[in-house]
Image (tube, rainbow, N blue to C red):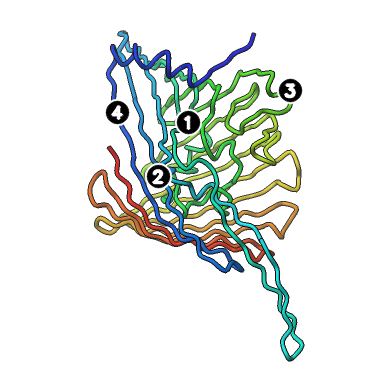
């Protein structure tokens, strides 16, 4: 039997009747960022306006009695402007010159272009479920347990030009487990004696996958699995997470049969917070296997939070592709819901002249 957990169908069929009977909360985030991106050996500095972290959502819940609730969430992201995530940098020309002393100098010009949707709406999490004393069950397009355990929650600059993921060297860069959402999925979460457990699995079997290939990195396929366990303690937490992408994807090279695992933790003392994460990726191609370390320090002073983040992505078999990540910045809270940030990122590609430096500033408003 073919199971199809289509997010669009869930949204169309369920929003209106649920909204008429359940408690509905409308929420959102509006964020804009201006970033200047400089790639070593490039003759130009690229300025990018980005809004990829913006969203609007509808969260609904109905009390069914006897401790049972029906819950759901539908969220969309308005893409107002071209995203820095769609930026591609490549060498476009090479010139050679010889000085009077006979010294030969080679210069490479690198050009960065931005492609993708300039405007529009894209789907984020879209799910319905039931919750009770036994925990919560969800079905649809879910948050990824791997991504939201440690991961993006530890990165103060997530979804900006300063973030650690997206190939910047601070977190694994493949889509499954680190970006987007987990569609065609079943999820369960609960807390046992303070220990938080979160699992997700896709039962989806689609002819489009042709047994080994699926059309999107974010489409769950039968056998795709994620799990996370978090143990809180006074002042912090520790946890582990796992993600298995059983099938190949045509949109994210190197994620066929991928397995990601990590250990993470954080600890706060006074105005300081230390966060750390260690990831290991086992790819279908051994040359793509990697280990990634991420460490961050946050210091809160009044309405300002000063942030320093370091990362290293080490390829198991190709030292020339190792990547180092550094980000420094400050986040200023104007109010409970409005904040701004200013920061700097450097991504150093070992053995390559295309190192990236970013200066970014942005404003974020929650509602």
Label 3 – label 4 distance at C-alpha: 40 Å
Q: Residues within 10 Å of mark 3 (few under 14, many from 20)?
A: few
Residue drawn at the location 72% of the way across and 79% of the way down: 97
Q: Earlier in the sequence, mark 4 or mark 1?
A: 4
Front in this rendered view, residue 80 or 39:
80
Q: Nearer the viewer, mark 3 or mark 1?
A: 3
Q: Which residue is mark 1?
A: 143
Q: Which residue is mark 2?
A: 236
Total count of labels: 4
Q: Residues within 10 Å of mark 2 (few under 14, many from 20)?
A: some
Helix, strand or loop at mark 3? loop
Q: Are marks 2 and 4 in contact (CB under 8 Å)?
A: no
Label 1 – label 2 distance at C-alpha: 22 Å
Q: Nearer the viewer, mark 4 or mark 1?
A: 4
Q: Is residue 228 above or below residue 85?
A: above
Helix, strand or loop at mark 1? loop
Q: Are marks 4 and 1 in contact (CB under 8 Å)?
A: no
Q: Position of residue 119 (x, y in %)?
A: 44, 39
Q: Nearer the viewer, mark 1 or mark 2?
A: 1
Front in this rendered view, residue 229 or 248:
248
User: Residue 213: which quarter of the image?
Assistant: top right
Q: Earlier in the sequence, mark 2 or mark 4?
A: 4
Q: Are marks 3 and 1 in contact (CB under 8 Å)?
A: no
The image's mark for residue 26 is 4
Q: Nearer the viewer, mark 3 or mark 2?
A: 3
The N terminus, quarter of image? top right
Q: Position of residue 65 (x, y in %)?
A: 30, 8
Residue 223 lies left or right of residue 7; in this view the side is right
Q: Which residue is mark 3?
A: 211
């Amino acid at each position: 039997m073919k199971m199809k957990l289509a997010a669009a169908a869930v949204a169309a069929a369920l929003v209106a009747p649920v909204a008429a009977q359940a408690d509905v909360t409308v929420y959102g985030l509006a964020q804009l960022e201006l970033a200047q991106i400089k790639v070593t050996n490039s003759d130009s500095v690229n300025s990018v306006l980005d809004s990829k972290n913006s969203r609007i959502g509808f969260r609904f819940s109905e009390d069914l009695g006897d401790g049972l609730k029906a819950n759901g969430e539908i969220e969309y992201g308005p893409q107002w402007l071209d995203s820095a995530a769609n930026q591609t940098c490549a060498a476009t020309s090479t010139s050679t010159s010889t000085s009077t002393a006979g010294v030969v100098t080679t210069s490479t010009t690198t050009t960065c272009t931005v492609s993708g949707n300039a405007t529009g709406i894209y789907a984020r999490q879209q799910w319905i479920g039931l919750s009770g004393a036994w925990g919560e069950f969800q079905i649809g397009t879910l948050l990824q347990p791997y991504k939201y355990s440690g991961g993006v929650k530890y990165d103060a600059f997530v979804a900006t030009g300063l973030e650690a993921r997206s190939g910047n060297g601070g977190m694994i860069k493949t889509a499954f487990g680190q970006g987007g959402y987990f569609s065609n999925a079943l999820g369960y979460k609960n807390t046992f004696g303070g220990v938080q457990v979160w699992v997700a699995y896709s039962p989806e079997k689609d002819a489009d996958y042709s047994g080994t290939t699926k059309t999107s990195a974010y489409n769950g396929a039968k056998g795709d699995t994620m799990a996370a366990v978090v143990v809180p303690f006074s002042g912090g937490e520790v946890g582990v997470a796992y993600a298995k992408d059983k099938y190949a994807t045509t949109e994210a090279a190197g994620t066929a049969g991928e397995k990601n695992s990590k250990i993470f933790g954080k600890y706060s003392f006074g105005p300081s917070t230390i966060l750390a994460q260690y990831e290991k990726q086992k790819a279908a191609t051994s040359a793509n296997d990697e280990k990634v370390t991420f460490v961050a320090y946050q210091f809160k002073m009044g309405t300002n939070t000063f942030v320093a983040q370091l990362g290293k992505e080490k390829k198991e078999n190709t030292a020339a592709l190792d990547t180092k990540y550094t980000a420094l910045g400050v986040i200023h809270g104007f109010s409970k819901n409005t904040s701004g940030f200013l920061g700097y990122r450097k991504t150093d590609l070992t053995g390559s002249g295309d190192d990236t430096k970013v200066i970014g500033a942005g404003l974020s408003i929650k509602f």
